[in-house]
Amino acid sequence: MLRKAKPYWSIDPEDAVDWTLRGPSAYPTRMEAVTETEHILGLSRELLDDIELDRLPSDKLLLKANRLARLTGSEEVRKWLSLEMNGYYDGDSVSLKYMTLTGRWVNFAERKGWWGPLAQQQANLDSLRSRLEGSKLTSVSGDATLGAINVTHRNQATLTNSIATFAGIQSRVLGLLHTFVAGVYYERQFADAAASTFEFYKRDVDALIAERAGGVLEKFPTVIARLREGDAEAVSQALTTCRRILEAFSDSVYPPRDGTYELGGNELKLDASKHQNRLNVYVAERTQSSSRRARLRQNLANLFDRVSTGVHNDVTVEEAHSLFLNVYLFLGELLHLGQANGNVTEVP
């Protein structure tokens, strides 16, 4: 029914739809080890299939999508889905926005449109299609034949136009729903792949650090704890610990020694105070790529520069997090360089 806006009330649907449709055995219990990310990924994948394969009626589809929106914290989508389940109303920016996006306006200036929920629009669509099917002429004769045919054609054209309106609303709703679900699915799929990749790499790096520089691992929790506090003093302490991590790592993988080392035409001292020199020599002895050496040398110089005491006040908590992660990845890359080559031969 075409009407003007009326006062709106809303309910917050529960998640019973999945339980009733698929049964309790289809979903893990709270005791099973399923992370929220895995649950969201699985739910969004199911919803994509539900939409693309037309597996669920619209009311169940909206309830299931509302669950996904709640899990992902998508408040605007939740409100829109509530409007699709309970009806739209005037005077609200989200309601008016989705009235436009779903093609419901008949006359925007007069606020006339199809304010009802999606189920109502679909009922209108089904009714119009039945009327169109019933309007087909089967047998007409006599003097009124031409007039009857003309009237029927006009009625059928009106019905067809109305069908197009409601079918368009339905199509736009499903399109918006598909866009939201697909966005969640691909975002979570990438996040899951990235997390899995980093976790695999982290286990490998942790094992290497424990084997080659075990004392370094003990300092990581201190940095994390300080960064979580977030104030300037805590950030300064975290950066100081990052510097100590680099120095302790240098002492473990390339201990201090007498003499010098020629690298790039420079004589590098290798005594206890020259942590940066020793790490550069460590790199030089384990890779023949001059471009990789240059990159690692620059990265090391940047790290030492930013974790130095004199620049702590210039480092934000966000940069401090990035520096800590960079230190960790830098140590991991150095430990993956392998054994020393014995002599230094530069190649591009």
Image: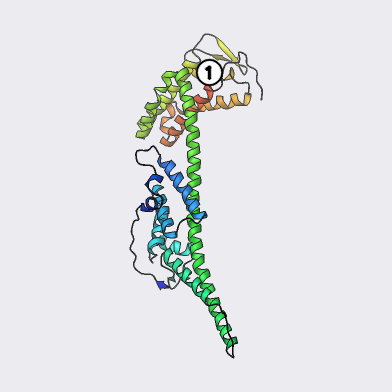
Q: Residue at x 45, y 72 (%)?
A: 109
Residue 195 placement (x, y as % from top left): 47, 36
Q: Is residue 104 above or below residue 192?
A: below
Q: Quadrant of the C terminus?
A: top right
Residue 230 placement (x, y as % from top left): 36, 35
Q: Callout 1: 10 Å neighbours few (<14), some, many (20+)?
A: many
SS at badge 1: helix
Outermost residue, bottom side: 143
Q: Residue at x 47, y 28 (%)?
A: 202
- Quadrant housing residue 138: bottom right
Closer to us: 4 or 150:
150
Read off the residue under disc 1: 277
Q: Is residue 324 above or below residue 13?
A: above
Outermost residue, right side: 347
- Quadrant housing residue 5: bottom left
Closer to us: 48 or 298:
48
Question: Which amino acid, by three-letter code, is at mark 1?
Answer: Asn
Q: Residue at x 34, y 41 (%)?
A: 30
Closer to us: 15 or 286:
15
